[in-house]
Image (cartoon, rainbow, N blue to C red):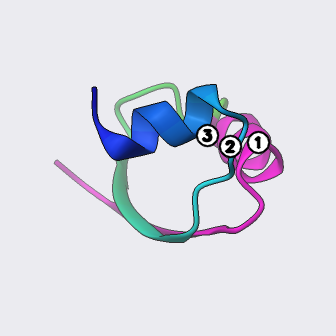
């Protein structure tokens, strides 16, 4: 088990930066909700999203 997974099971929050790329082809209307939910679950994790075309 990875250290991050173990910390999550122990209730410890992740921190740092996560970079993701988002395409228009995958559920574009749900992206805002997904990003909001993610940031609420991991408030110490900085999320850097990039929008573009595949």
CB under 8 Å between discs 1 and 3: no
The residue sitting at 54% across, 41% down in the picture is 7
Characterize the local packing of mark 3: few (<14), some (14-19) or many (20 or more) Cα atoms within 10 angstroms.
Answer: some
CB under 8 Å between discs 2 and 1: yes
In-image side of 20 versus 35 (left or right): left
Q: Mark 3 highlights which residue?
A: 31
**Mark 1 → mark 3, Cα distance in angstroms:** 15 Å
| Residue 32 x %, y % | 71, 45
**Mark 2 → mark 1, Cα distance in angstroms:** 5 Å
What segment carries the magenta color? Answer: 31-54
| Residue 18 x %, y % | 43, 64
Q: Is residue 54 above or below residue 20?
A: above
- Residue 50 can be seen in this image: no
Q: Mark 1 highlights which residue?
A: 41
Q: Earlier in the sequence, mark 3 or mark 2?
A: 3
Observer-side mark, 3 or 2, equals 2
The residue sitting at 67% across, 36% down in the picture is 34
The residue sitting at 77% across, 60% down in the picture is 43
Q: In the rendered image, which quarter is residue 28 located in?
A: top right
Q: Earlier in the sequence, mark 1 or mark 3?
A: 3
User: Mark 1: which secondary structure?
Assistant: helix
**In the rendered structure, does residue 17 fall within the stretch colored magenta?**
no
Q: Which mark is drawn over residue 53?
A: none
Q: Which mark is drawn over residue 38?
A: 2
Identify which residue, 11 or 31, lies in the foreground.
11
User: Mark 2: which secondary structure?
Assistant: helix
Identify which residue, 38 or 42, lies in the foreground.
42
| Residue 39 x %, y % | 73, 53
Q: Is residue 43 above or below residue 35?
A: below
**Mark 3 → mark 2, Cα distance in angstroms:** 10 Å
User: Mark 3: which secondary structure?
Assistant: helix
The residue sitting at 16% across, 48% down in the picture is 54
């Amino acid at each position: 088990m990875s250290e991050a997974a173990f910390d999550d099971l122990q209730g410890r929050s992740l921190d740092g930066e996560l970079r993701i790329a988002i395409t228009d082809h995958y559920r574009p209307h749900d992206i805002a909700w997904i990003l909001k939910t993610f940031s609420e679950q991991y408030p110490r994790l900085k999320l850097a999203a990039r929008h573009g075309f595949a």
